[in-house]
Image: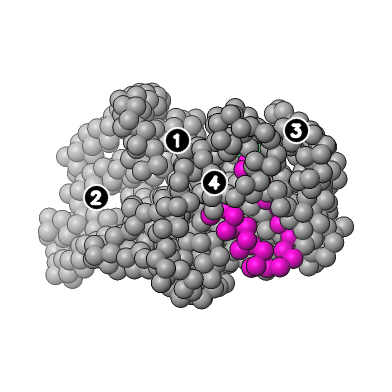
C-alpha cells in the first residue's frame, strides 16, 4: 500500500496534470459500459412495450456513449504513455542520485548490494508505470463493477450478493500470485545477473580476444543457459501454482453466471422480467465476471509492482557507506603534511588485514615514493587517501584535520590521481582528458597543455578529428553519418591520457600516481616525472612504481611490507641501509646489466634509455605489475612517432 502511494506520489510529482487527466478519462471509461447496457435495456423495453416512449433520443444517447467508448480508449492509452514518459525522466533522476548519494566504494563491492541495485534499476524501469497503470485500470474496473453490481442488485439482490462474494477469493488468489512472482524475481536476481554477465562476455571487446583464443564461446553460453534455466524453472513453478489456484475461482464464477442466466430466462418467461431487464442482466453478470477478473489481474500486477518498487525505495534508504560528519570541516590548502597515524585497514570484517599500523607522513612540496611487492596494500593506501574508504582503525590527518571530519567531495577536489586501474572512457580524446576537471572541459588550451605534459599531445593531434575524435569502437560519433568512426589508442597511449587527465588538476594539493607507467616506456615515465616537476614546482606527490630507477630521485622513498612501513629514507640512505629496498633495487638493476656484469647499485642508475626487458622476478618490482616486454624498445617507438615539427606544439 505504501509502495502504491509512493509510486503514485512519484507519478504525481512527475506530471500532475497528466495523471489527473488519465484518472478522469479512465473513470469515465469505466462508467460507459453500464450506461450502454442501461440504454440498450431501455431501448428494448420501449420497442417491446406498446407506447413505451420515443426511441430516437435514447438511440442518440447510445450513439454518444458508443462514441465516448471509442474515444476514451485511445485517450487513456495516450495519457498512460505520457505519464510513463514523465515518470521515466523522474525515476532515472532519482535512481542516479540514489547511487551518487553514496560517497564511497564499499556498497558497490557487496554482491547483495549489487543484486539490490539491479532489482532497483529494473523496478525503476517499469514498476512505477505498472503500478500507476494498474491502480488506474483497477479503479476503472471497480467503477465498471460497481455500475453492473448495482444494476444486478436492483434486479435480483441475492444474485448480486453472491457475485460480490465470489470476487473475494479470486482477488486473494491473484494477490498471492503477484507476491510469489515478485519473490521469484528477488530470489533469482543473482542468477539473472550472472546470466547477463556471461552473455555480455561474449560480445565485450575487452574479453573477446581471450574468448576467441581459448575457445570459450560454448563454455560461457552453457553457463548463461544454465542460469537462465534456473530462473525459468522458478518462474514456471509459481505460474503453474497460480494457474492451479485460479481454476476453482473461474469454475465457481462460471457456475454463478449460469445459474443467474437460467433464473433470469425463466423469470422473463414468467413475465417477471422485461426483455430489457433480461438484456441488462445478462450483460451485467457477464460484465461482472470480466470486471472481477480484470480487477484481480490488475491487483496482482499492482501488488507485484509494489513489491518490486520497494527494491527501488530501499536503494534510497541504504545508509551511506562512509560515516559523514554532520558539520564537515573545510579542507584547507595543504601547508604542512598529510599524516597517516597507526592506520589499520581491511576490506570487510571477515577479510584479512591489509594495512597493520601504517605511520607515514607526506610532506607538502615533497615527492614521496611508495614501493613494495605485489599485494602489500599500496593501491589500498591510495584509496584511503582519497577517502573511498575510511581506515578501520587509526587516522589520516590533513594538516591536522581528520579526513573523517571533512566532506569527501571537498577532499577530492584537492586531489589528482592516476589509479592503477584508471578508466578508459568511450568519449572523445578531449573529453577523456577534460573530465579530469570537468569545469575546464571546454578549455582546449588546458586540455592540450595537460596532454602535452603527459607526452600524448602529438599523438592525439594526429587522430582523424584531433581531440574531437571518439576513442571508441562501440559508439559512432554523435551526428556523424558513419563518416567519423572512433579510433583506438595503444595501452601506453591510454595510460598517458590517464596521466593527462590527472594533469588537468595541476594545482591539486596532492598528486597521486599509482603505477602511472606500467605500460609506458622508461623514457616516457621519466618525461612524466619531469613534467610533474615543471608543471607545478613544489607539488606534493605520492608516486607508486615498481620501476625503482624512476623513483630514486624522490625526496623520500618508503617501503610498504607486511602492512607497515618497513623502511624510509632517500635512495642513498636506503641503499646504505642494505634492506629490502636495496635488495629489490639490485635485483632489478641486474636485469639492466650486461650479462656477467651484475655489480649492483650503480648499474641501475644508468640512463633510462638503456632499458631492456626486466627478467621475471616473481614478487620483485617489475614483476606482475609491469607487463614485461612492452618496455622493449618502446621508448624509441614513441619518440619516433613525434614528428619534429609537431613536437612541442601546444594547440590541438
Ligand atoms: N576491493 C577489494 N576488496 C577486497 N580485497 C581487496 C580489494 N582490493 C584489493 N584487495 C586485496 O588487498 C590486497 C592489497 O591490494 P592492493 O591493490 O592494495 O595491493 P598493491 O600493493 O597495490 O599491489 P600491486 O603491486 O599488485 O599493485 C590484495 O591482497 C587484494 O586481494
Ligand atoms: Mg597496486
The residue carrying mark 4 has its beta carbon less than 8 Å from ligand 1: no
Residue corresponding to mark 2: 280
Q: Nearer the viewer, residue 419 or 114?
A: 419
Q: Quadrant of the C terminus?
A: bottom left
Look at mark 1 in the image and give the residue it sits on: 193
Please tell me which residue is depicted at 54% across the width and 61% down the height of the picture: 454
Magenta stretch, residue numbers: 524-547
> Residue 496: percent from the left, percent from the top?
51, 56
- Residue 529 forms part of the magenta stretch: yes
- Marks 2 and 1, the one that precedes in the sequence: 1
Separation of residues labelled 4 and 3 (CA atoms): 24 Å
Quadrant of res 401: bottom right
Image location (x, y in percent) of residue 392: 78, 39
Helix, strand or loop at disc 2?
helix
The answer for how far apart the CA atoms under marks 2 and 3 are is 96 Å
Query: Crowding at label 3, few (<14), some or many (≥20) Cα neighbours within 10 Å?
Result: some
> Position of 292 compared to 532: left or right?
left
Residue linked to disc 3: 580
Q: Earlier in the sequence, mark 2 or mark 4?
A: 2
Amino acid at each position: 500500500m505504501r509502495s502504491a502511494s509512493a509510486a503514485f506520489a512519484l507519478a504525481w510529482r512527475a506530471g500532475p496534470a497528466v495523471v489527473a487527466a488519465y484518472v478522469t478519462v479512465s473513470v469515465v471509461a469505466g462508467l460507459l459500459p453500464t450506461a450502454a447496457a442501461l440504454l440498450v435495456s431501455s431501448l428494448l423495453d420501449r420497442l417491446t412495450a406498446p407506447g413505451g416512449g420515443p426511441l430516437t433520443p435514447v438511440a442518440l444517447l447510445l450513439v454518444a456513449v458508443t462514441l465516448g467508448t471509442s474515444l476514451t480508449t485511445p485517450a487513456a492509452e495516450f495519457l498512460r504513455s505520457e505519464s510513463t514518459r514523465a515518470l521515466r525522466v523522474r525515476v532515472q533522476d532519482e535512481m542516479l542520485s540514489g547511487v551518487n548519494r553514496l560517497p564511497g566504494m564499499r556498497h558497490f563491492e557487496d554482491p547483495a548490494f549489487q543484486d539490490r541495485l539491479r532489482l532497483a534499476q529494473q523496478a525503476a524501469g517499469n514498476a512505477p508505470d505498472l503500478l500507476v497503470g494498474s491502480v488506474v485500470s483497477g479503479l476503472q474496473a471497480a467503477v465498471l463493477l460497481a455500475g453492473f453490481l448495482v444494476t444486478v442488485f436492483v434486479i435480483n439482490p441475492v444474485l448480486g450478493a453472491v457475485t460480490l462474494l465470489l470476487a473475494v477469493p479470486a482477488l486473494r488468489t491473484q494477490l498471492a500470485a503477484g507476491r510469489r512472482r515478485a519473490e521469484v524475481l528477488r530470489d533469482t536476481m543473482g542468477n539473472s545477473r550472472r546470466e547477463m554477465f556471461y552473455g555480455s562476455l561474449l560480445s565485450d571487446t575487452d574479453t573477446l580476444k581471450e574468448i576467441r583464443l581459448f575457445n570459450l564461446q560454448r563454455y560461457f553460453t552453457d553457463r548463461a543457459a544454465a542460469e537462465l534455466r534456473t530462473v525459468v524453472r522458478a518462474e514456471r513453478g509459481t505460474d503453474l501454482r497460480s494457474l492451479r489456484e485460479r481454476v476453482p475461482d473461474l469454475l465457481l464464477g462460471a457456475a454463478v453466471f449460469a445459474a443467474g442466466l437460467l433464473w433470469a430466462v425463466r423469470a422473463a418467461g414468467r413475465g417477471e422480467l422485461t426483455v430489457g431487464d433480461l438484456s441488462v442482466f445478462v450483460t451485467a453478470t457477464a460484465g461482472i465476471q470480466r470486471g472481477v477478473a480484470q480487477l484481480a489481474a490488475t491487483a496482482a500486477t499492482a501488488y507485484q509492482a509494489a513489491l518490486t518498487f520497494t527494491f527501488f525505495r530501499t536503494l534510497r534508504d541504504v545508509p551511506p557507506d562512509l560515516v559523514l560528519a554532520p558539520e564537515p570541516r573545510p579542507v584547507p590548502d595543504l601547508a604542512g603534511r598529510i599524516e597517516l597515524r597507526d592506520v589499520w585497514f581491511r576490506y570487510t570484517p571477515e577479510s584479512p588485514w591489509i594495512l597493520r599500523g601504517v605511520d607515514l607522513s607526506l610532506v607538502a612540496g615533497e615527492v614521496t615514493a611508495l614501493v613494495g611487492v605485489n599485494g602489500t596494500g599500496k593501491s589500498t593506501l591510495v584509496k584511503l587517501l582519497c577517502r573511498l574508504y575510511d581506515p578501520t582503525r587509526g587516522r589520516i590527518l590533513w594538516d591536522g584535520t581528520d579526513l573523517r571530519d571533512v566532506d569527501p567531495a571537498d577532499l577530492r577536489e584537492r586531489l589528482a590521481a592516476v589509479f592503477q586501474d584508471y578508466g578508459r572512457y568511450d568519449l572523445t580524446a578531449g573529453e577523456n582528458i577534460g573530465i579530469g576537471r570537468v569545469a575546464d572541459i571546454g578549455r582546449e588550451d588546458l586540455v592540450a597543455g595537460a596532454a602535452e605534459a603527459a607526452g600524448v599531445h602529438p599523438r592525439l593531434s594526429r587522430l582523424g578529428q584531433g581531440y574531437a575524435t571518439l576513442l571508441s569502437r562501440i559508439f559512432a560519433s554523435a551526428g556523424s553519418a558513419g563518416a567519423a568512426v572512433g579510433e583506438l589508442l595503444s595501452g601506453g597511449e591510454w595510460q598517458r591520457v590517464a596521466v593527462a587527465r590527472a594533469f588537468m588538476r595541476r594545482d591539486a594539493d596532492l598528486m597521486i600516481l599509482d603505477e602511472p607507467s606500467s605500460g609506458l616506456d622508461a623514457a616516457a615515465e621519466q618525461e612524466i616525472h619531469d613534467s610533474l616537476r615543471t608543471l607545478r614546482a613544489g607539488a606534493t606527490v605520492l608516486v607508486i612504481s615498481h620501476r625503482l630507477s624512476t623513483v630514486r630521485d624522490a625526496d623520500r622513498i618508503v617501503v610498504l611490507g607486511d602492512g607497515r612501513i618497513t623502511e624510509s629514507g632517500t635512495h642513498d640512505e636506503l641503499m646504505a641501509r642494505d634492506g629490502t629496498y636495496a635488495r629489490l633495487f639490485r635485483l632489478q638493476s641486474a636485469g639492466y646489466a650486461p650479462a656477467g656484469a651484475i655489480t649492483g647499485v650503480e648499474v641501475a642508475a644508468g640512463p633510462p634509455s638503456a632499458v631492456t626487458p626486466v627478467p621475471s622476478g616473481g614478487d620483485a618490482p617489475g614483476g606482475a605489475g609491469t607487463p614485461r616486454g612492452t618496455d622493449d624498445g618502446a621508448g624509441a617507438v614513441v619518440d619516433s612517432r613525434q614528428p619534429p615539427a609537431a613536437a612541442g606544439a601546444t594547440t590541438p
